[in-house]
Amino acid sequence: MSTEVRREIRLIEEEDGWWSAIDEEIGVASQGSTREEALDNLDEAVDLTREAREDDTPAPEPDAPWFDA
């Protein structure tokens, strides 16, 4: 039995020759000058997004005078 996680990714070659990689389930997109670079960048963005969501720490209180009530 495989423990591999399956993901559906959209890979698009843009008009300017760059590539976009999109993971709509996670809600993350990235780009690169090659398909491989776009996919590598997407993997990194997905990992960082998952880490941030797991941390789920509250936002800091605003520290600017225009936020005073």
Image (cartoon, helix red, strand yellow):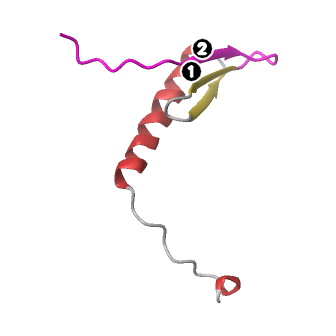
The amino acid sitting under disc 2 is Arg
Which disc number belongs to residue 35? 2
Identify the secondary structure beneath mark 1.
helix
Q: How many numbered discs sit on the rendered protein?
A: 2
Question: CB of mark 2 within 8 Å of CB of mark 1?
Answer: yes
- Residue 10, above or below 56: above
Q: On the rendered structure, is 39 left or right of 58?
A: right
The amino acid sitting under disc 1 is Glu
- Residue 57, above or below 5: below
Q: On the rendered structure, is 8 left or right of 55?
A: right
Magenta residues?
1-18
Q: Position of residue 50 (x, y in %)?
A: 40, 41
Q: Main secondary structure of the magenta part?
A: loop
Look at 23% across and 18% down and name the residue there. 3
Look at 66% across and 82% down and name the residue there. 67
Look at 56% across and 28% down and name the residue there. 24
Which of the pair 7/45 is nearer the observer? Answer: 7
Which disc number belongs to residue 24? none
Magenta includes 7?
yes
Q: On the rendered structure, is 54 left or right of 34?
A: left
Q: Which residue is mark 1?
A: 37
Q: Rate crowding at label 1 as few (under 14), some (14 to 19) or many (20 or more) other CA atoms within 10 Å.
A: some
Residue farthest along the right direction in this orientation:
15
